[in-house]
Amino acid sequence: MRLILLGAPGAGKGTVAKLLTQLDGSVQISTGDILRGAVQAGTELGKKAKEYMDRGDLVPDDLILGIMEKRFLEPDCQKGFLLDGFPRTIPQADALKKILVKLNIKLDMAVNLEVPREVILDRLSTRRTCVNSSCQAIYNVKSMPPKVAGKCDKCGSEIVQRADETEAAISKRLDTYNEKTAPLIGFYKKEGLLFDVNATASDTVVNAIKRKIDGI
Ligand code: AMP
């Protein structure tokens, strides 16, 4: 399948993407994970992106588009992809449209994960992430704690609260989402690709997407 996952930070895009990859081998492409990996590795991209990310601001479109143009050419995208955190602005959505036309790739739909703000605030403040850049597994201290406190079940690395998941950065990220990313809902509605789902529970979302894709 070829999907865009839209939704505020904490709406569950990453969790839903991981569940969907198990269905048909589509690959999860998370620009946030790619950027965190680059920050940790200390690459030029990471150095440029870090200050925006720590503040809860979006990284400039040209940096993101530079990553994504190359990413679609990698062989693992052939079975399908789940875009998690991209596009995040109207210029990114316009650029994505052009890239896909050039590569002759058709999107199935843009899924909009709808979650009440109080659920998002609670999820983000209790979320923990594995520091290993090739793992980045996600936990929740309330609903999905690791088996051993502070250690990743999958790779044993430390799990931490992300720098952009402090109260101030969360609030900034939600404002940024409302201002810059929420307009994409109208964009994909016009394109005839929008699918709204109530995303309070991730497995309900996955089932709704499966049913919709089967019906397409
Ligand atoms: P995420 O893990 O998707 O919440 O992304 C974490 C941070 O990475 C965001 O707050 C942005 O600073 C940056 N980021 C991720 N994806 C994008 C994107 N498509 N455009 C701009 N910035 C992004």
Image (spheres, rainbow, N blue to C red):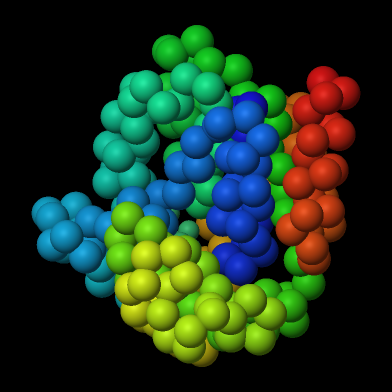
Asked whether residue 77 is in view, the answer is: yes
Task: Identify the image quadrant of residue 72.
Answer: top left
Task: Identify the image quadrant of residue 56.
Answer: bottom left
Q: Position of residue 211 (x, y in %)?
A: 86, 34
Asked whether residue 169 is in view, the answer is: no
Could you tell me which residue is drawn at 60 percent across and 18 percent down?
Answer: 106
Q: Count the marks: how many?
A: 0
Q: Where is residue 163 in the image (x, y as percent from the top left)?
A: 37, 80
Quadrant (top left/top right/bottom left/bottom right) for the N terminus: top right
Q: Which of 206 and 111 is in front in this view?
A: 206
Could you tell me which residue is drawn at 61 percent across and 57 percent down?
Answer: 15
Could you tell me which residue is drawn at 53 percent across and 16 percent down?
Answer: 105
Q: Nearer the viewer, residue 6 or 207?
A: 207
Q: Where is residue 50 in the image (x, y as percent from the top left)?
A: 25, 67
Name the side, left or right, on which 161 lies relative to 157: right
Could you tell me which residue is drawn at 29 percent across and 29 percent down?
Answer: 70
Q: In the figure, 49 relative to 16: above or below?
A: below
Quadrant (top left/top right/bottom left/bottom right) for the C terminus: top right
Q: Position of residue 27 (x, y in %)?
A: 50, 36
> Looking at the image, in which quadrant does ligand 1 appear?
bottom left
Q: In the figure, 144 relative to 198: above or below?
A: below
Q: In the figure, 85 relative to 155: above or below?
A: above
